[in-house]
Image (spheres, grey):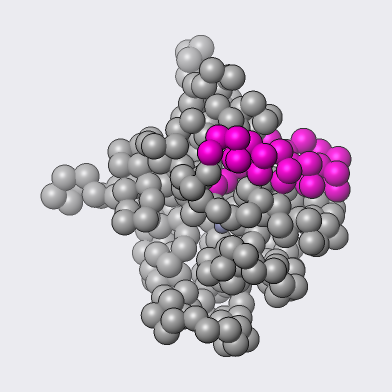
Amino acid sequence: MIGNAGLKTLHVFSIDVEDWYQSSFDHGADISDVCVNNTRKVLGVLGQHGVKGTFFMQGMVASKFPDLVREIDSLGHEVQSHGYSHRPINSMTPAEFKAELTKTSRLIEDVTGKPVTGFRAPDFSIDSGTFWAFDVMRECGILYDSSIFPLKTRRYGVSGFAKGYSVINTPSGTVDELPVSVLELNWAGRLRFPVGGGGYFRLLPLWFLNYCVERLDEEALPFVIYCHPYEFNPEELRMIMRRIPLTRRLHQGLGRGNFQKKVSHLLSTRAFGTMSSVLAGLKNNRGKKACA
Ligand SMILES: [Zn+2]
């Protein structure tokens, strides 16, 4: 089921299921059940609005909490892959990446009984130096990806990459790419702003997010939201007693208080669905245009 079906454009709600401390601070740390509780908050919000979303599940989380995978799947959401360890792709060899993809897909598929066909890289770590990753994905049965950040930032991104749906050719076959949303404004040339998630989404006022969705609607582009379970829990940083630099705490904590309110507003006023359902619509439209 798709919330608010019948409205103009179908947008994407996607979430990267990971444990903040392990994924962002210490890759050697254990996964805690805080991440399970936070994910259940997200499931509750989606349930309130009758929206199905795409959950990019980190393999370490699926391994420790298979019941969480089962719960997400049983509620009708899509469970796809966010790699295993949350190490960035540009720190891995193709063989290491393949091993992570295979392991994570197996963990999820063993629980859901459905093939894993979608992927999002940790920290959007596919850039012009790691395009080999698409070939590895296709070899491992991945048919669509949402790892490209179509804007170059200090940490990641590919400048000038297509904002909407595109198809990437690899020796093993094609991979559909649907990046997270950026807003393009014609101020002093074409400037792009990241609006689909992360710190940007947390800090932008709601009126500006509504403006972004309208602008994307005009271009027939879906608004692709990405978020994390911990963003639904403003208390989490206070609960983590381990040593984390103050600047990191402040950066990660900014805007968490209003995050759920913003997401709820968007889910209640627009039509959202899974990445697979939105991609199917985009491919269908492209097919019709090609035939016209
Ligand atoms: Zn992540």
Q: Examine the rendered structure and indicate whether residue 233 appears above or below residue 112.
A: below
Q: Which residues are magenta?
A: 93-121
Identify the residue at image location x=59%, y=63%. Answer: 27
Q: Quadrant of residue 67?
A: bottom right
Left or right: where 102 falls relative to 268: right
| Figure quarter occupied by ligand 1 | bottom right
Identify the residue at image location x=16%, y=45%. Answer: 189
Q: Examine the rendered structure and indicate whether residue 21 appears above or below residue 236.
A: above
- Residue 106 part of the magenta segment: yes
Q: Examine the rendered structure and indicate whether residue 235 appears above or below residue 231.
A: below
Q: Is residue 288 visible?
A: no
- Residue 84 part of the magenta segment: no
Q: Position of residue 278 (x, y in %)?
A: 59, 39
Q: Position of residue 145 (x, y in %)?
A: 56, 38
Left or right: where 249 falls relative to 182: right
Q: Quadrant of residue 139?
A: top right
Q: Is residue 69 visible?
A: yes
- Residue found at the very far top of the displayed protein: 291
Identify the residue at image location x=53%, y=31%. Answer: 134
Name the foreground residue: 122 vs 116. 122
Identify the residue at image location x=42%, y=84%. Answer: 246
Q: Position of residue 65 (x, y in %)?
A: 80, 62
Q: Position of residue 101 (x, y in %)?
A: 66, 41
Left or right: where 163 falls relative to 41: left
